[in-house]
Image: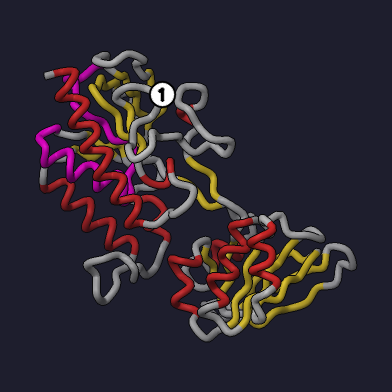
Amino acid sequence: MIETIKDTVIIGSGPAGYTAAIYAARANMNPVMYTGMQPGGQLTTTTDVENFPGYPDGITGPEMMEHLQKQAERFGTQIHYEYITNVILATEPGKLHTIKSSSGQEIQTRSVIISTGATAKYLGLDDETKYAGSGVSACATCDGFFYRGRPVAVVGGGDTAAEEATYLAKLCTQVYLLVRKDELKASKVMQERVFNTPNITVLFHHELVGLEGDKVVEKAKIVNNQTHEISELAVDGVFIAIGHKPNTELFNGVLKMDDIGYLITEEKTTKTNLPGVFAAGDVQDNVYRQAITAAGTGCMAALDAEKYVAEFFH
């Protein structure tokens, strides 16, 4: 059943989606949001957020998302707790897009804002789930502050892992970098930074196999994948830095993406390669990946969508 034509549909929640909704609603676009499988996005798995402006005492990720949701709803955003199963995106300006939801709803909309985010890759260990928010993280700039003056481990061998390790080395007493191969995949510059940082110890041919601790991480169990020797590291935190996967499967073959799958937007805008389709947040950002930058692009997407709708439909 096709409902009334909408000015904009926002696919995905989180800082980008909610901010887009706030701006679009205030512009009288009557936005409709589909939250996706994880309402609130990655921040709902973060215990404390202390680097988002306006919260001098910090706030938990779930609380912050609740605040953003209430603000979006206050201005009239319709929020549906379901996910999108199919999109038929127009290729010409001034044409309608069709969105289909998991409940069978079919909506036609003048513009689409994609804020489906990205998902951090994990190793798949049960202990990663057990200690989530209590010693396991996938973001050093988000959570490194909580490990000041304490030893930590970083898992990974690419640029992300090298960046996380060097960032944490400024805060932590000791950083162990666990690399499963015999070399780093990181760029030469990042490798030099790692090897020139005194409190980073690189452990080649080592993999994380388990975590131990009473409620919070106290030890990391690691294995040498050549000798099969198992040992322990006394660490208070473990950062998984093996990359992120953008949630863009729905748009494969339709929207332009980079080699990893991040949506490509025009420089200094949130415009994708199709007219009236905009992308905000981590789904198009593989560099910063912060709540504040996601919120900023959410604002941009709403403004871009408002301008597009005004130009081609009014």
Query: Residue 233 location in percent, x, y?
Result: 69, 79
| Residue under the image location 57 percent in, 63 percent down | 163
Which quarter of the picture shows residue 201? bottom right
For the record, the magenta segment spans 1-29
How many discs mark residues in the rendered view?
1
| Residue under the image location 14 percent in, 39 percent down | 25
| Residue under the image location 36 percent in, 19 percent down | 89
The C terminus: image quadrant = top left
Q: Which residue is mark 1?
A: 86
User: In this picture, is 299 found above or below 232?
Assistant: above
In this image, 142 relative to 296: left or right?
right
In this image, 227 relative to 259: left or right?
right
Q: Can see residue 153?
A: yes
Q: Nearer the viewer, residue 264 or 56?
A: 264
User: In this picture, is 216 found above or below 242?
Assistant: below
In this image, 191 relative to 171: left or right?
right
Q: Amino acid at mark 1?
A: Asn
Residue 15 lies in the magenta stretch: yes
Q: Nearer the viewer, residue 12 or 268?
A: 268
Q: Nearer the viewer, residue 71 or 24?
A: 24
Residue 188 lies in the magenta stretch: no
| Residue under the image location 30 percent in, 37 percent down | 34
- Element type at marker 1? strand
Q: Can see residue 82?
A: no
Query: Residue 104 location in percent, x, y?
Result: 33, 23
User: In this picture, is 102 found above or below 172?
Assistant: above
The N terminus: image quadrant = top left
User: In this picture, is 77 found above or below 177?
Assistant: above
Which quarter of the picture shows residue 283? top left
Residue density around tag 1, few if under 14, some if 14–19, many if 20 or more, within 10 Å: some
Query: Residue 57 location in percent, x, y?
Result: 26, 76
Which quarter of the picture shows residue 23? top left
